[in-house]
Amino acid sequence: MQSNTIMRNAWQQRIIVPAFNIPYIPMMEPIMQAARDEDAFCLVAVARLEWTKFQSKSMAAISREFQRLESSDHVRLHLDHIPVIDEDNLKVPYLDLIREALGLGFQSVMVDGSRLPLDDNIAATRAVVDIAHEAGVPVEAELGAVLGHEADPGMSYEEIVRTRTGFTSVDEARRFVTETGCDWLSVAFGNIHGAVSEALRHNKKVAAQLDIAHLKDLSGAAGIPLVLHGGSGIPAQSIHEAVRHGIAKINIGTELRQTYEQELGASESTDKAQAAVLIRTRSILRDFLEIGGKKDQVTGGV
Ligand SMILES: [Zn+2]
């Protein structure tokens, strides 16, 4: 079943689909094992900054590992954040990267034009939708600013929430979805990415406060599955409430990355670090997201 059909099934049934980021290639195996063990459905995802600033090497390396491991219908491969302008304010050849991903068999892709003015974000996203849809692959886009990838976001998390900085505009969301034809939309309503700057990346993430009333308005305007980036560190109750109001996919990066890095640092054993990721991912699927045993409901059992 195609990833977009799966996502829409999940969205209609209010079942969340987690996308787990892979900043280190050995993390993929235990995450896929966890999905099978819990009979849950999830995506494994790699973002550009995970091969430029972490150790996932390349899209090709990630795709090879996915193909080496794939043996079930519990997982799909997703390309996360391909920025048009990156976290260091540099231009990215995003269309070339998306084309490469489509050629490598990525089953859904994300283009992130959120650092651009609205019209430019629409144009860039539209260009990606055109080539991805031709290949039968759904597109996630981002509107508003889910901060945290920058070395210095310029203000504290408390200030971001109090001033609603970067929150996705309801009117813009309506226009954006209509004009781009994107399939899933990443929105900002109090969520924040885990820090990737060297100074902050080992710190515990702040507990995010989601503005559910704003999410409801966004969901009504967008009319497509919405995506919650920065899923680590959000209380379970808030996640479940967000799922009831239009969130169909949650990106989880920081929590598993830190699990892997901490165990690897302590034991210097990749096996032990993988074992720690397996335990933590199973717990996230079963206890935190409560999607254990739900794979058939999401994929239609095919
Ligand atoms: Zn993100």
Image (cartoon, rainbow, N blue to C red):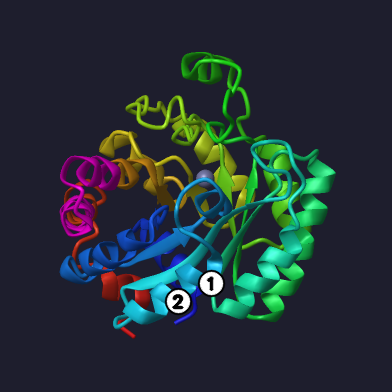
Count of numbered circles in the view: 2
Q: Residue at x 58, y 23 (%)?
A: 152
Q: CA distance from mark 2 to mark 1?
A: 6 Å
Q: Is mark 1 within 8 Å of ligand 1?
A: no
Quarter of the figure that contains the C terminus: bottom left
Please state if 102 lies on the left or on the right of 71 as rendered. Answer: right
- Name the chief secondary structure element in magenta: helix
Q: Which element type, helix, strand or loop, lies under badge 1?
A: helix
Disc assigned to residue 22: none
Q: Which residue is mark 2?
A: 64
Residue 186 in the magenta stretch? The answer is no
Q: Residue at x 57, y 15 (%)?
A: 155
How far across and down, in percent of the image, does residue 160 sit?
Answer: 55, 19
* The image quarter in which residue 105 lies: bottom right
Magenta span has 271?
Answer: yes
- 152 and 226: which is toward the camera: 152
The kind of residue tagged 1 is Ala
Q: Quadrant of residue 40?
A: bottom left
Residue 296 lies, in percent from the top left, at 28, 76
Instruction: Return the residue found at the far bottom.
Output: 302
Vertical placement of 183 versus 289: above or below?
A: below
Q: Which mark is residue 60?
A: 1
Q: Position of residue 288 (x, y in %)?
A: 22, 46
**Residue closer to the observer: 1 or 219:** 1
Q: Identify the residue at horizontal 42%, vertical 72% (top origin).
A: 76
Q: Do the residues under discs 2 and 1 have CB atoms within 8 angstroms?
A: yes
Q: Which residues are magenta?
A: 259-281
Disc 2 on helix, strand or loop?
helix
